[in-house]
Image: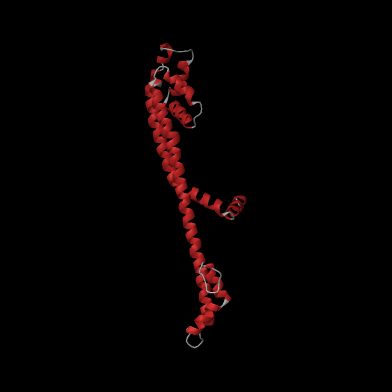
Amino acid sequence: ISRILRTLRVVKQFRQLYLLLQGFVQSMVSVFWILVLFLIIVLTCGIFVTDTVGANAEEWANGPGAEAGDVDKINEQFGTLTASMLTLFRFVTLDDWYDTATLVGKQQPHMLWFFIVYIMISAFAMIALLTGVMTDQINTVSSASEKEMMALEFGEKSAAFKRIFEDNASAADNMVSRDELVEIFEQPETRKHLRSMNMQLSGDDA
């Protein structure tokens, strides 16, 4: 555990990496629901291909272009709902999907269009959605961090100006006269603070 804590402290030293990690963690809720949606799509399509392909495996025994072993491959990949879901998940990774789609297309050519649409939705649209959600969350975290840093910087500068005015205020009434105000703004420390706020001062080069 101590090593993990040390690693997290090191991560905090790199602001961009820390913001990336923070955005990733905060996007977990959205990522979870995207995964639930993905599971529903795979489950629904798995039921469909099991009933359409797996339940009709005999077509690959006597149909046009049938080869030895086709029926075994169909049963292996679409014979049960679990097998169909695993096959469809492999489609998402684009791992050897073409050979499986071609095998199914021998007897059910219309299924080729189903597989193409499925890949476009599951492999491309879902990944784009996942990427968009995480990117949006990271941008939100980054924006909030920048606002926090600006507020902290503003607070530090306000505190510095307050100290300057308090140090130069009249002891009797704790008020700053016009002459004292002019004198304050002529002080190098005050001018330094004003320049840090991107204010152009008289006497500075344009």
The residue closer to the viewer here, 58 or 188, is 188
Residue drawn at 43 percent across, 26 percent down: 84
The percent coordinates of residue 57 (x first, y second) are 41, 17
Residue 14 visible in this rendered orientation of the protein: yes
* Furthest residue toward bottom: 172
Quadrant into which the C terminus falls:
bottom right
**Whole-percent x, y for residue 53 in the image:** 40, 21
Q: Which colour scheme is used?
A: secondary structure
* Residue in view at x 46 percent, y 43 percent: 131
| Number of numbered discs | 0
Residue 100 vs 4, above or below: the answer is above
Rendering coords of residue 165 (x, y %): 51, 79
Q: Can residue 27 be seen in this view?
A: no
In x, y percent, where is residue 179?
50, 84
Quick one: which residue is furthest to the top in this view?
62
> Farthest front residue?
206
Compared to 14, does 30 lie above or below?
above
Q: Nearer the viewer, residue 202 or 61?
A: 202
Left or right for 123, reference 3: left
